[in-house]
């Protein structure tokens, strides 16, 4: 690709990111940024479609007989925290950094993948189709995000999920399961030592959770871990023994365990009743022998296991999580991404796909 064309792609991507930063797009409120992405594609004469607040497009010479790769990132953001010293919705460039809400998570990845899609859109005789999707509700794992749009994309064989990884390859990702638990007792008067204290029963289970270690340890993600993060009783009086106690377990699962295996361990050891809120956010991994990963290795990129979850968990095909920016900046005050990171991201994505499509 000619240098001037790359420079144009980079400038257009950075310009789009500035527009996205200027447009609030909290989860479930992404209508305006979805419209910006649609307008961007229309400006480039690329047909695209919306499904809810998700936007997708396919390369000009899409062939249903070929395998397809999905390029995906999200355009929703969290709400700005109180530590901001800059206006989160004013894109500000200073010392090579572009500041603004969503700049790093995951606006830089999103516009880099859009630029990459533009690069391949018109090319004939590709070995694979290239499909792009900008998804909504990623920050809340909402049901109207990537899961809503996947049925409209055709057969997808593998994909790249754009998240800030410093352009290293996240080849595995922890799963997340939140479990609601209830310990049952019997109410009584505390002064007379009556009843059965549900709080004490809950504490017995919490003690087991705190000390239990799952035996299978992943070389990429380490051990699967459980943490009790919420506990409460219905009592508002100090002199009543609680008849029930509710607590919540946050479970982070490596790729060596299924959710069913985690739940079976709880069934065998907890006295409290429990029920998972959802089993959607499963742990995932992609083989180091996959063509995407081999291409990244050939380009000198490293790989690791990611402790955070993303839309990758909701895709029923192999995906590589990779993108410009740094996960450590996500959801922080005065969020930023380096301009050069976006430029490098576009270049790296194009090189990655050039290796095999």
Image (cartoon, rainbow, N blue to C red):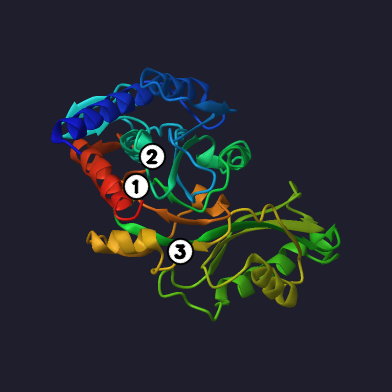
Number of marks in picture: 3
Q: Position of residue 171 (x, y in %)?
A: 41, 62
Residue corresponding to mark 3: 286
Q: In the displayed structure, does residue 138 sit left or right of residue 128?
A: right
Mark 3 nearby-residue class (10 Å; few <14, some 14–19, many ≥20):
some
Residue located at (23% from left, 44% from top): 347
Q: Position of residue 233 (x, y in %)?
A: 73, 53
Spatial separation of the CA atoms under disc 1 and disc 2: 7 Å
Residue corresponding to mark 2: 106
Spatial separation of the CA atoms under disc 2 and disc 3: 21 Å
Determine the secondary structure under disc 3.
Answer: loop
Determine the secondary structure under disc 1.
Answer: loop
Tag shown at residue 278: none
Depth order, front residue of 236/31: 31
Discs 2/3, front: 3
Residue corresponding to mark 1: 164
Please tell me which of labels 1 and 2 falls first in the chain. 2
Please tell me which of labels 3 and 1 falls first in the chain. 1
When the figure is inspected, residue 348 is found, relative to residue 197, above or below; the finding is above
Mark 2 nearby-residue class (10 Å; few <14, some 14–19, many ≥20):
many
Residue located at (42% from left, 25% from top): 46
The quadrant the N terminus occupies is top left
When the figure is inspected, residue 332 is found, relative to residue 168, above or below; the finding is above
Q: Position of residue 39 (x, y in %)?
A: 42, 19
Mark 1 nearby-residue class (10 Å; few <14, some 14–19, many ≥20):
many
Residue located at (47% from left, 20% from top): 35
**Occupied quadrant, residue 268:** bottom right
CB within 8 Å, label 1 to label 2 = yes
Spatial separation of the CA atoms under disc 3 and disc 1: 18 Å
**Occupied quadrant, residue 185:** bottom right
Q: In the displayed structure, does residue 114 sit left or right of residue 70?
A: left
Q: Position of residue 195 (x, y in %)?
A: 85, 65
């Amino acid at each position: 690709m000619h240098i001037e064309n790359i420079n144009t792609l980079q400038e257009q991507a950075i310009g789009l990111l500035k527009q996205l930063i200027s447009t609030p797009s909290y989860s479930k409120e992404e209508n305006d940024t979805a419209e910006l992405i649609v307008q961007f594609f229309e400006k480039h004469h690329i047909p695209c479609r919306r499904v809810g607040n998700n936007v997708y497009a396919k390369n000009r010479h899409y062939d249903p007989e070929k395998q397809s790769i999905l390029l995906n990132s999200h355009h929703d953001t969290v709400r700005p925290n109180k530590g901001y010293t800059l206006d989160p919705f004013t894109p500000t460039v200073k010392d090579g950094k572009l500041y603004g809400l969503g700049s790093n998570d995951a606006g830089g990845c999103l516009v880099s993948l859009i630029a990459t899609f533009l690069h391949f859109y018109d090319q004939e005789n590709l070995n694979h189709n290239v499909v792009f999707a900008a998804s909504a509700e990623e920050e809340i794992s909402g049901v109207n995000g990537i899961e809503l749009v996947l049925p409209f994309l055709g057969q997808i064989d593998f994909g790249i999920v754009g998240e800030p990884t410093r352009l290293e390859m996240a080849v595995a990702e922890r799963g997340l399961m939140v479990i609601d638990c209830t310990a049952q007792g019997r109410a009584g008067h505390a002064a007379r030592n009556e009843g059965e204290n549900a709080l004490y029963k809950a504490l017995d289970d919490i003690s087991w959770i705190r000390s239990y270690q799952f035996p299978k340890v992943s070389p990429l993600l380490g051990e699967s871990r459980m943490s009790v993060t919420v506990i409460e009783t219905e009592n508002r009086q100090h002199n009543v023994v609680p008849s029930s106690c509710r607590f919540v377990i946050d479970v982070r699962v490596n790729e060596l365990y299924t959710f069913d295996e985690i739940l079976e361990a709880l069934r065998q050891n907890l006295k409290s009743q429990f029920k998972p809120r959802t089993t959607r956010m499963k742990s995932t991994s992609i083989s180091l022998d996959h063509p995407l990963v081999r291409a990244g290795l050939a380009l000198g990129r490293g790989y690791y296991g990611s402790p955070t979850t993303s839309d990758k968990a909701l895709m029923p095909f192999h995906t590589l999580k990779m993108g410009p920016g740094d996960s450590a900046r996500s959801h922080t005050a005065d969020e930023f991404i380096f301009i050069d990171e976006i430029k490098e991201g576009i270049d790296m994505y194009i090189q990655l796909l050039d290796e095999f499509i």
